[in-house]
Amino acid sequence: DTAVSQTPKYLVTQMGNDKSIKCEQNLGHDTMYWYKQDSKKFLKIMFSYNNKELIINETVPNRFSPKSPDKAHLNLHINSLELGDSAVYFCASSQQRDGFETDTQYFGPGTRLTVL
Amino acid sequence: GQSLEQPSEVTAVEGAIVQINCTYQTSGFYGLSWYQQHDGGAPTFLSYNALDGLEETGRFSSFLSRSDSYGYLLLQELQMKDSASYFCAALVSGGYNKLIFGAGTRLAVHP
């Protein structure tokens, strides 16, 4: 009964390859996110989807393409992988609300991507 | 730009109290969250302050001063299992809410 799950947990690949990471949440949340955590543990938002609609797209190379087939799933496809893409990628979900209300995000276990 | 600053490392002994400070420079600020992350694990939510003052949740408390753009996480009765990284994160809005994370504070608890 994992709340937010990701596959795969580890991904080792060569430069130039294309790879995908999948995420699923069973919390009934409307909003899902992709974060990148680099080797210095800096956690930065990449994308966010609300009910399958892209709502946040930070300055991310267009080699990264998210896709949300439904509000419980968010995938991340990366083309032409580069050494600098090596990081841990976290999926998260939350129930978006307006105003001064908490927006607790629930994170998946992460996918450690290593580009050789 | 939007940024948060927190100390990179803090060391304490079991049973002690430790305070992790966080200052922020953001626009569209809603509130300040704290997340805990053990090595190899995922960030997990600890607390959220939308209003000034202290919020207490068991051994952990979090404080916010909006006028000073400052907050802190207070951990009491430290245990070895509290050794982890702690991130402050500003909830901001630019249409849709998003979290801007600080660089994290690594807490090491020693016997």
Image (spheres, helix red, strand yellow):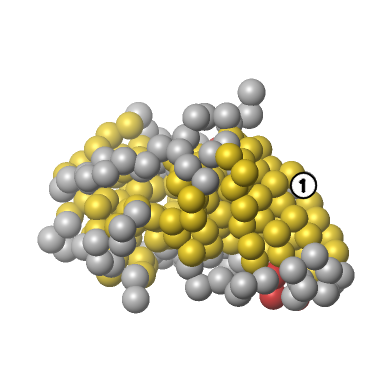
> What amino acid type should be assigned to the residue bearing mark 1?
Pro
Left or right: B58 as drawn, with respect to B69: right
* Vertical side of B16 occupied by B106: above or below: below
The quarter of the image holding the C terminus of chain A is bottom right
* Residue B110 visible, this orientation: no
Q: Residue furthest left?
A: B67
Q: What residue do we see at 52% from left, 29% from top?
A: A27
Residue A25: % across, % down: 58, 35
Residue assigned mark 1:
A8
Left or right: A60 as drawn, with respect to A101: right
Q: Residue furthest top?
A: A1
Image-quadrant location for residue A105? top left
Residue B78: % across, % down: 44, 39
Residue B77: % across, % down: 40, 35
* Residue A1 visible, this orientation: yes
Element assignment for label 1: loop
Image-quadrant location for residue B53? top left
Q: What residue do we see at 62% from left, 44% from top?
A: A69
Judging depth in this view, the residue of B1 and A25 nearest the camera is A25
